[in-house]
Amino acid sequence: MTALTPAIAYQVRQPPPHLAEFIESYWSVTCISDIPKNVVVMPDGRVDLHFFSSPHEPYHAALAGLECELSPVTVMPGSRLTSVSFKLLAMEYVLGSSVAHLLDDRMLVDPAEWGICMADAADFDVFCGKLNDKISSLVKPGVDERKRRMFDLIYSSKGSATVADIADAAQWSSRQINRYFNQWFGMSLKAYCSILRFRASLVQIKEGKFYPEDFYFDQAHFIKDIKKYSGMTPKELHKNRDDRFIQLLALKKP
C-alpha cells in the first residue's frame, strides 16, 4: 500500500492477461487521516464498480458510468473504496448491459451478486482474486472483431486516433460507431477520445510540461481540454494544491 498523502493510501493491480481487454485495473483508496479529506475526481474514461466500507455508513457497492464532469468527494476517516475499473468492451461482454443512463451518475448494486463481502473488500489480495474468478465466469464468448480492433486502436492511441482512422481499422462506418457509443456508453466516440487524450496528458502535466506533446495539435486546444475536464489551467493543475486530485498523485509514467 502506498501513502499518496498523509491522508490517503492507495493500492493498484493489473488484471491477468486473459481479462486485459475487459479490465483496466483493480485499485483501492483508504482514508488514513483522522479528519475528512476533500478531493476532486476527474473524468478518466473508465466505468467503475465500487465497493465502499466506512465507519460512517453501511457497506455497499455501486456501478459508476463514464464521467465528463468533475466530481467533488469528501473522503471520511477510516473509509475504504475498493474498485475494479472496466474497459468499455466489458459493458457488452461482461456486464451485458448499457451504462448510457449512468453518464455522470451511478447506481447501487448488490455486492453479493459479485461475491464480495465487506471483509473481502478490506483484503486487496482476496478482492482481486475473487473478482478475477467472477469476471472470468461472466465473459461472453465471440467478441466482435470489429469492436476489438476499434478499442485496440482507441486505447493504444490514447484517444489521439481520428474517427476516420478508427472507422477504417474497425471496418465500421463512423455513423455506426457513434450509434454504438451513444447506445452503450452515453457519449459519442469523439467525446470519449477527448477524455482519453486529457487523461494521457496528465503524465506530462505532473512532470511540469505545459505544452502539448503527443495528443494535441496546438496549445489552445490543449489548454481548453485541460480546463474543461479539470477546471484549471495546466500550470494550476500541476500545483495540485491541497492534494485535491488523487488521480494526479497516483499517476506513474508508463
Image (cartoon, rainbow, N blue to C red):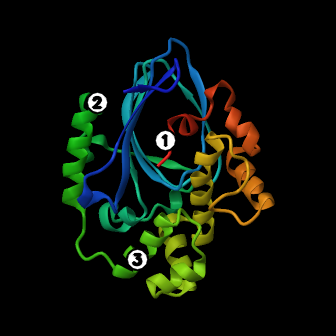
The total number of labels drawn is: 3
**Could you tell me the amino acid type at mark 3?**
Arg
**Could you tell me the amino acid type at mark 2?**
Met
Looking at the rendering, which quadrant does residue 230 occupy?
top right
Give the side of residue 103 with respect to residue 145, left or right: right
The answer to whether mark 1 and mark 2 are in CB contact below 8 A is no
The residue beneath circle 2 is 118
The residue beneath circle 3 is 149
Name the N-terminal-most of marks 1 and 2.
2
The residue beneath circle 1 is 252
In this view, the mark in front (3 or 1): 1
Point 26% across, 29% down: residue: 123
Tell which residue pokes out farthest to the right in this image.
220
Kind of element beneath mark 2: helix
- Up-down: is 250 above or below 155? above
Name the N-terminal-most of marks 3 and 1.
3
Looking at the rendering, which quadrant does residue 130 occupy?
top left
CA separation in Å, label 3 and label 1: 27 Å
Give the side of residue 156 with respect to residue 186, left or right: left
The answer to whether mark 2 and mark 3 are in CB contact below 8 A is no
Kind of element beneath mark 1: loop
Tell which residue pokes out farthest to the top in this image.
34
